[in-house]
Amino acid sequence: MKKLLFLTFSSILILSACNNNNDEEIDVSNNVERKSVDNEAEKSESKSTSTDEKNTSSNKNKDVEGSKEKETEPLIKKEELTKEQIIAMTLFDQTPNDYGHYIVPTGEDFLNHEYTKYDNPSDPYEGDQQKEVHEVSLIKTDMDSWFSDNPPYNLDMYSIQPENNNANAIIGITNDRVILFGTQAIQQWETVLEHGNEYFIDELYENYKDDERVNELVNMIVYYDNYEEYSSNSPNKH
Protein backbone atom coordinates (compact mmCIF):
# COMPACT_ATOMS: atom_id res chain seq x y z
CA MET A 1 0.00 0.00 0.00
CA LYS A 2 2.81 2.42 0.92
CA LYS A 3 4.58 1.52 -2.29
CA LEU A 4 1.49 2.29 -4.34
CA LEU A 5 1.10 5.70 -2.70
CA PHE A 6 4.74 6.50 -3.39
CA LEU A 7 4.40 5.65 -7.08
CA THR A 8 1.24 7.73 -7.39
CA PHE A 9 2.90 10.78 -5.77
CA SER A 10 5.96 10.42 -8.03
CA SER A 11 3.76 10.37 -11.11
CA ILE A 12 2.01 13.55 -10.02
CA LEU A 13 5.39 15.33 -9.55
CA ILE A 14 6.61 14.23 -12.98
CA LEU A 15 3.43 15.41 -14.69
CA SER A 16 3.64 18.74 -12.88
CA ALA A 17 7.24 19.23 -14.00
CA CYS A 18 6.34 18.46 -17.59
CA ASN A 19 3.55 21.00 -17.54
CA ASN A 20 5.90 23.66 -16.18
CA ASN A 21 8.44 22.93 -18.90
CA ASN A 22 5.73 23.14 -21.56
CA ASP A 23 4.52 26.46 -20.17
CA GLU A 24 8.07 27.82 -20.24
CA GLU A 25 8.52 26.64 -23.81
CA ILE A 26 5.25 28.31 -24.85
CA ASP A 27 6.29 31.55 -23.12
CA VAL A 28 9.66 31.50 -24.88
CA SER A 29 8.00 30.74 -28.21
CA ASN A 30 5.51 33.57 -27.68
CA ASN A 31 8.30 35.96 -26.75
CA VAL A 32 10.24 35.04 -29.91
CA GLU A 33 7.14 35.54 -32.03
CA ARG A 34 6.41 38.92 -30.40
CA LYS A 35 10.03 40.04 -30.91
CA SER A 36 9.86 38.95 -34.55
CA VAL A 37 6.60 40.84 -35.10
CA ASP A 38 7.98 43.91 -33.31
CA ASN A 39 11.18 43.83 -35.41
CA GLU A 40 9.18 43.55 -38.63
CA ALA A 41 7.01 46.50 -37.56
CA GLU A 42 10.11 48.56 -36.75
CA LYS A 43 11.67 47.71 -40.12
CA SER A 44 8.45 48.58 -41.94
CA GLU A 45 8.16 51.87 -40.06
CA SER A 46 11.83 52.66 -40.79
CA LYS A 47 11.36 51.94 -44.51
CA SER A 48 8.22 54.08 -44.57
CA THR A 49 10.03 56.95 -42.83
CA SER A 50 12.98 56.67 -45.23
CA THR A 51 10.64 56.67 -48.25
CA ASP A 52 8.76 59.69 -46.90
CA GLU A 53 12.04 61.55 -46.35
CA LYS A 54 13.19 60.74 -49.90
CA ASN A 55 9.86 61.89 -51.35
CA THR A 56 9.98 65.10 -49.30
CA SER A 57 13.57 65.76 -50.44
CA SER A 58 12.63 65.04 -54.06
CA ASN A 59 9.65 67.39 -53.89
CA LYS A 60 11.81 70.12 -52.35
CA ASN A 61 14.36 69.73 -55.16
CA LYS A 62 11.60 69.95 -57.76
CA ASP A 63 10.23 73.07 -56.09
CA VAL A 64 13.70 74.67 -56.11
CA GLU A 65 14.23 73.76 -59.76
CA GLY A 66 10.81 75.10 -60.68
CA SER A 67 11.51 78.31 -58.78
CA LYS A 68 14.85 78.72 -60.58
CA GLU A 69 13.16 78.22 -63.95
CA LYS A 70 10.59 80.90 -63.12
CA GLU A 71 13.31 83.26 -61.92
CA THR A 72 15.40 82.81 -65.08
CA GLU A 73 12.54 82.82 -67.59
CA PRO A 74 12.99 85.92 -69.78
CA LEU A 75 10.30 88.51 -70.40
CA ILE A 76 10.45 87.73 -74.12
CA LYS A 77 10.77 84.04 -74.99
CA LYS A 78 13.11 83.24 -77.87
CA GLU A 79 10.68 80.82 -79.50
CA GLU A 80 7.96 83.49 -79.43
CA LEU A 81 10.10 86.35 -80.79
CA THR A 82 8.18 88.37 -83.40
CA LYS A 83 9.30 90.51 -86.33
CA GLU A 84 7.95 93.59 -84.57
CA GLN A 85 10.01 92.85 -81.46
CA ILE A 86 13.13 92.43 -83.62
CA ILE A 87 12.50 95.81 -85.24
CA ALA A 88 11.94 97.44 -81.84
CA MET A 89 15.19 95.94 -80.51
CA THR A 90 17.03 97.26 -83.57
CA LEU A 91 15.75 100.79 -83.00
CA PHE A 92 16.97 100.70 -79.40
CA ASP A 93 20.35 99.32 -80.48
CA GLN A 94 21.17 101.99 -83.04
CA THR A 95 24.61 103.59 -82.97
CA PRO A 96 25.12 107.20 -84.14
CA ASN A 97 27.53 108.23 -86.87
CA ASP A 98 30.52 110.51 -86.34
CA TYR A 99 28.21 113.52 -86.03
CA GLY A 100 25.97 111.90 -83.45
CA HIS A 101 23.20 111.36 -86.00
CA TYR A 102 20.94 108.32 -86.13
CA ILE A 103 19.34 106.89 -89.27
CA VAL A 104 15.90 106.98 -87.66
CA PRO A 105 14.68 108.11 -84.24
CA THR A 106 15.88 105.80 -81.48
CA GLY A 107 13.51 103.56 -79.59
CA GLU A 108 13.64 106.00 -76.69
CA ASP A 109 12.80 108.90 -79.03
CA PHE A 110 9.68 107.07 -80.21
CA LEU A 111 8.57 106.33 -76.67
CA ASN A 112 9.09 109.99 -75.73
CA HIS A 113 7.15 111.06 -78.85
CA GLU A 114 9.89 113.48 -79.85
CA TYR A 115 12.99 113.27 -82.05
CA THR A 116 15.60 115.48 -83.68
CA LYS A 117 15.29 116.11 -87.42
CA TYR A 118 18.74 116.73 -88.91
CA ASP A 119 18.40 119.37 -91.61
CA ASN A 120 22.11 119.24 -92.45
CA PRO A 121 23.45 115.67 -92.30
CA SER A 122 27.07 116.85 -92.23
CA ASP A 123 26.56 119.17 -89.27
CA PRO A 124 25.32 117.97 -85.87
CA TYR A 125 23.60 121.24 -84.98
CA GLU A 126 22.87 123.45 -88.00
CA GLY A 127 19.18 123.46 -88.80
CA ASP A 128 18.27 120.72 -86.32
CA GLN A 129 14.60 120.69 -85.33
CA GLN A 130 12.67 118.96 -82.57
CA LYS A 131 9.61 117.19 -83.96
CA GLU A 132 6.77 115.12 -82.59
CA VAL A 133 6.37 111.47 -83.45
CA HIS A 134 3.34 109.30 -82.69
CA GLU A 135 4.08 105.97 -84.32
CA VAL A 136 6.74 103.83 -85.98
CA SER A 137 5.52 103.81 -89.58
CA LEU A 138 6.62 100.82 -91.67
CA ILE A 139 5.94 101.12 -95.39
CA LYS A 140 6.27 97.91 -97.38
CA THR A 141 8.97 97.97 -100.06
CA ASP A 142 11.17 95.47 -101.95
CA MET A 143 14.83 94.75 -102.65
CA ASP A 144 14.71 95.85 -106.29
CA SER A 145 13.85 99.38 -105.20
CA TRP A 146 17.12 99.78 -103.26
CA PHE A 147 19.74 97.33 -104.59
CA SER A 148 21.42 97.39 -107.99
CA ASP A 149 22.60 93.81 -107.45
CA ASN A 150 21.22 90.80 -105.60
CA PRO A 151 21.84 90.56 -101.85
CA PRO A 152 23.10 87.14 -100.68
CA TYR A 153 19.76 86.41 -98.97
CA ASN A 154 16.15 87.48 -99.17
CA LEU A 155 15.13 90.46 -97.07
CA ASP A 156 11.71 91.42 -95.77
CA MET A 157 12.04 95.15 -96.38
CA TYR A 158 10.33 98.31 -95.11
CA SER A 159 10.86 102.03 -95.29
CA ILE A 160 10.79 103.51 -91.78
CA GLN A 161 9.13 106.85 -91.13
CA PRO A 162 10.00 109.31 -89.88
CA GLU A 163 13.66 109.31 -90.87
CA ASN A 164 16.15 111.58 -89.12
CA ASN A 165 17.53 113.27 -92.22
CA ASN A 166 16.74 113.68 -95.89
CA ALA A 167 17.66 110.11 -96.84
CA ASN A 168 15.28 107.19 -97.05
CA ALA A 169 15.56 104.97 -93.97
CA ILE A 170 15.34 101.29 -94.95
CA ILE A 171 15.24 98.21 -92.76
CA GLY A 172 15.61 94.65 -94.06
CA ILE A 173 15.06 91.49 -92.00
CA THR A 174 16.18 87.90 -92.58
CA ASN A 175 15.90 84.87 -90.34
CA ASP A 176 19.13 85.72 -88.49
CA ARG A 177 19.99 89.41 -89.05
CA VAL A 178 18.73 92.93 -89.64
CA ILE A 179 20.09 95.60 -92.03
CA LEU A 180 19.34 99.27 -91.32
CA PHE A 181 20.60 101.94 -93.71
CA GLY A 182 19.87 105.34 -95.17
CA THR A 183 20.02 106.04 -98.89
CA GLN A 184 18.95 108.51 -101.56
CA ALA A 185 19.51 106.16 -104.48
CA ILE A 186 19.82 102.53 -105.49
CA GLN A 187 23.08 101.05 -104.23
CA GLN A 188 25.14 97.87 -104.40
CA TRP A 189 24.92 95.46 -101.52
CA GLU A 190 28.51 96.01 -100.41
CA THR A 191 27.97 99.78 -100.30
CA VAL A 192 24.91 99.32 -98.12
CA LEU A 193 26.91 97.19 -95.68
CA GLU A 194 29.72 99.75 -95.65
CA HIS A 195 27.52 102.71 -94.75
CA GLY A 196 24.64 100.99 -93.01
CA ASN A 197 24.33 98.93 -89.83
CA GLU A 198 24.06 95.16 -89.59
CA TYR A 199 22.59 93.52 -86.48
CA PHE A 200 22.43 89.83 -85.57
CA ILE A 201 19.11 88.76 -84.11
CA ASP A 202 20.66 86.45 -81.50
CA GLU A 203 22.70 89.35 -80.13
CA LEU A 204 19.71 91.71 -80.16
CA TYR A 205 17.67 89.13 -78.28
CA GLU A 206 20.30 88.61 -75.58
CA ASN A 207 20.58 92.37 -75.05
CA TYR A 208 16.85 93.14 -74.90
CA LYS A 209 15.00 89.95 -73.90
CA ASP A 210 14.13 91.44 -70.49
CA ASP A 211 13.59 95.04 -71.61
CA GLU A 212 9.97 96.09 -71.05
CA ARG A 213 10.40 98.98 -73.49
CA VAL A 214 10.52 96.56 -76.41
CA ASN A 215 6.85 95.62 -76.14
CA GLU A 216 5.94 99.26 -75.49
CA LEU A 217 7.56 100.18 -78.79
CA VAL A 218 5.93 97.24 -80.57
CA ASN A 219 2.55 98.79 -79.74
CA MET A 220 3.57 101.90 -81.68
CA ILE A 221 4.34 100.04 -84.94
CA VAL A 222 1.89 100.60 -87.81
CA TYR A 223 2.18 99.01 -91.28
CA TYR A 224 1.33 100.72 -94.58
CA ASP A 225 1.17 99.18 -98.03
CA ASN A 226 2.60 102.25 -99.80
CA TYR A 227 3.63 105.90 -99.33
CA GLU A 228 0.26 107.19 -100.43
CA GLU A 229 -1.53 105.27 -97.68
CA TYR A 230 1.07 106.45 -95.18
CA SER A 231 0.75 110.12 -96.20
CA SER A 232 -3.03 109.96 -95.96
CA ASN A 233 -3.31 108.17 -92.63
CA SER A 234 -0.21 108.56 -90.46
CA PRO A 235 -0.46 110.99 -87.52
CA ASN A 236 3.24 111.80 -87.90
CA LYS A 237 3.96 115.21 -89.44
CA HIS A 238 5.52 114.82 -92.89
Image (cartoon, rainbow, N blue to C red):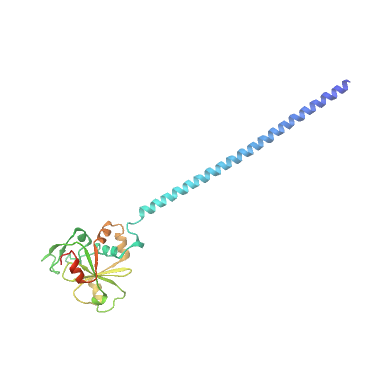
**What percent of the width, then of the height, locates residue 15?**
79, 28
Q: Tell which of 74 and 238 is nearer to you.
A: 238
Q: Quadrant of the C terminus?
A: bottom left
User: Furthest-left residue in view?
Assistant: 127
Picture residue at 47% right of the left edge, 46% below the top: 56
Residue 204 visible to an observer of this rendering:
yes
Q: Tell which of 225 and 140 is nearer to you.
A: 225
Picture residue at 77% right of the left edge, 30% below the top: 18
Residue 162 visible to an observer of this rendering:
no
**What percent of the width, then of the height, locates residue 104?**
20, 66
Q: How many marks?
A: 0
Quadrant of the rendered structure where residue 153 is?
bottom left
**What percent of the width, then of the height, locates residue 155?**
29, 72
**What percent of the width, then of the height, locates residue 229?**
21, 70
106 relative to 71, above or below: below
Q: Quadrant of the N terminus?
A: top right
55 relative to 2, above or below: below
On the rendered structure, is 173 left or right of 62?
A: left
Picture residue at 44% right of the left edge, 49% below the top: 61
Picture residue at 32% right of the left edge, 61% below the top: 206
User: Furthest-bottom residue in view?
Assistant: 149
On the rendered structure, is 118 left or right of 35?
A: left
User: Furthest-top residue in view?
Assistant: 2
Quadrant of the rendered structure where residue 231 is?
bottom left
Quadrant of the rendered structure where residue 132 is?
bottom left
